[in-house]
């Protein structure tokens, strides 16, 4: 008995989708060669087409910003906030500085990535002086939430929104009614000529105009991330074209997922893949400018190939099932005849 239209169509669809899967996979192989490239793939999947909009307040959150709910706060971090008396009533900025001083231990500079649970990351930051900027940013956000302070994370890169870059925090200060940034990992925040702490976008504007805002240590007893302030200024200035905003601060939601914890045993990449698939990761929004147009287009192209790969893979699997079912039905008809 000749193959029916369903079997022929499913077979054609399967092989067509398989070709697309192979071609897309081959085009993405260069991005599997280093951890920084894996970060680029992650960022491509998390990329929102909407540009970064930083002009909002926690009282009027964008509806799609993944904000951590107070009820989701890990009791361990609530205990830490109480033990260290982190919350200064009516003073969000003072609370943020106190959190930074807990994380930056006297006499020790951090180093080595941790990439573990929030509680383990906190322990290794404070006990062993370990951690990279992303580790500090996540734990700061966790302690800020446990202390009643709203924190969001900015990042910038040097390699087209890949893994070579930096992450820092910005808190909403209710007393002054504005955002204020601080870089706990590098142990400083920026102030203007009058000594007023600056927001992330204010710092960016100063740097874009060629200025150099003054740096104040978050934890005076802890060593600075940069021995020479001009090196830190240059570091931030080089990252100006590739700023982006993490569109969420739901650090506990991701950390408490049983699926994510199970995947973490297979490594950080597996953990992030599961978190992505479960929709727990906040997206990123790029602060668009003429200086990052090419980088944005390249990241969007990677995103297109990843989405095409996923869709083609699902279609190939569905076509394979249909093909197998149709072939089985044909064989049954042959035997019945």
Image (tube, rainbow, N blue to C red):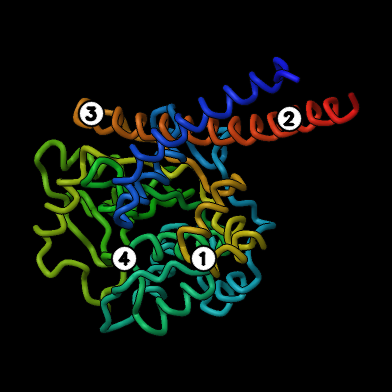
Q: Nearer the viewer, mark 1 or mark 3?
A: 3
> For mark 4, what is the residue?
185
Q: How many marks?
A: 4
Q: Residue at x 21, y 71 (%)?
A: 224
Marks 1 and 3, Cα distance to the nearest angstrom?
37 Å
Q: Secondary structure at mark 1?
A: helix
> How far is disc 4 from disc 2 in space, using C-alphas?
61 Å
Image check: 90 left or right of 305? Answer: right
State the SS at label 2. Answer: helix
Placement of 317 over or under 36, stated as above or below: above
Number of residues whose C-alpha sits closer than 10 Å to that of mark 4, classed few (under 14), some (14–19) or many (20 or more): many
* Marks 4 & 3, CB-CB < 8 Å contact: no
Cα distance in 3D space between marks 2 and 1:
59 Å
Q: Callout 2: 10 Å neighbours few (<14), some, many (20+)?
A: some
Say which residue appears at 86% left-offset and 30% top-offset: 335
For residue 327, which numbered disc appears in the image?
2
Q: Earlier in the sequence, mark 1 or mark 3?
A: 1
């Amino acid at each position: 008995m000749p193959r029916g239209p369903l079997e022929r169509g499913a077979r054609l669809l399967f092989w067509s989708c398989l070709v697309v899967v192979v071609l897309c996979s081959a085009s993405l192989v260069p991005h599997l060669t280093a951890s920084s490239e894996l970060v680029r793939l992650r960022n491509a999947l998390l990329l929102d087409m909407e540009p970064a909009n930083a002009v909002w307040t926690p009282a009027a959150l964008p509806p799609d910003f993944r904000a951590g709910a107070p009820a989701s706060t890990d009791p361990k971090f609530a205990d830490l906030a109480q033990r260290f008396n982190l919350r200064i009533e009516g003073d969000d900025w003072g609370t943020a500085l106190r959190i930074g001083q807990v994380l930056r231990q006297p006499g020790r500079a951090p180093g080595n990535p941790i990439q573990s649970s929030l509680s383990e990351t906190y322990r290794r930051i404070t006990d062993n002086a370990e951690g990279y900027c992303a580790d500090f940013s996540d734990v700061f956000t966790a302690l800020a939430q446990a202390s009643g302070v709203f924190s969001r994370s900015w990042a910038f890169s040097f390699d087209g929104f890949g893994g070579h870059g930096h992450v820092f925090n910005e808190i909403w200060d209710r007393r002054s009614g504005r955002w204020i940034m601080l870089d706990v990992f590098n142990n400083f925040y920026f102030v203007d000529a009058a000594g007023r702490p600056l927001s992330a976008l204010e710092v960016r504007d100063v740097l874009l105009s060629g200025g150099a805002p003054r740096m104040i240590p978050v934890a005076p007893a802890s060593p600075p991330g940069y021995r020479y302030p001009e090196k830190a200024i240059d570091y931030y200035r080089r990252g100006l074209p590739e700023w982006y905003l993490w569109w969420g601060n739901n650090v506990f939601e991701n950390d408490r997922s049983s699926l994510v914890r199970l995947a973490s045993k297979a490594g950080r990449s597996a953990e992030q893949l599961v978190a992505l698939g479960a929709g727990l990761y906040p997206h990123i929004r790029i602060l668009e400018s003429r200086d990052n147009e090419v980088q944005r287009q390249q990241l969007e192209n990677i995103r297109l190939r990843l989405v095409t790969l996923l869709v083609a893979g699902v279609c190939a699997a569905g076509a394979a099932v249909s093909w197998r079912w149709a072939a089985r039905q044909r064989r049954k008809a042959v035997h019945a005849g």
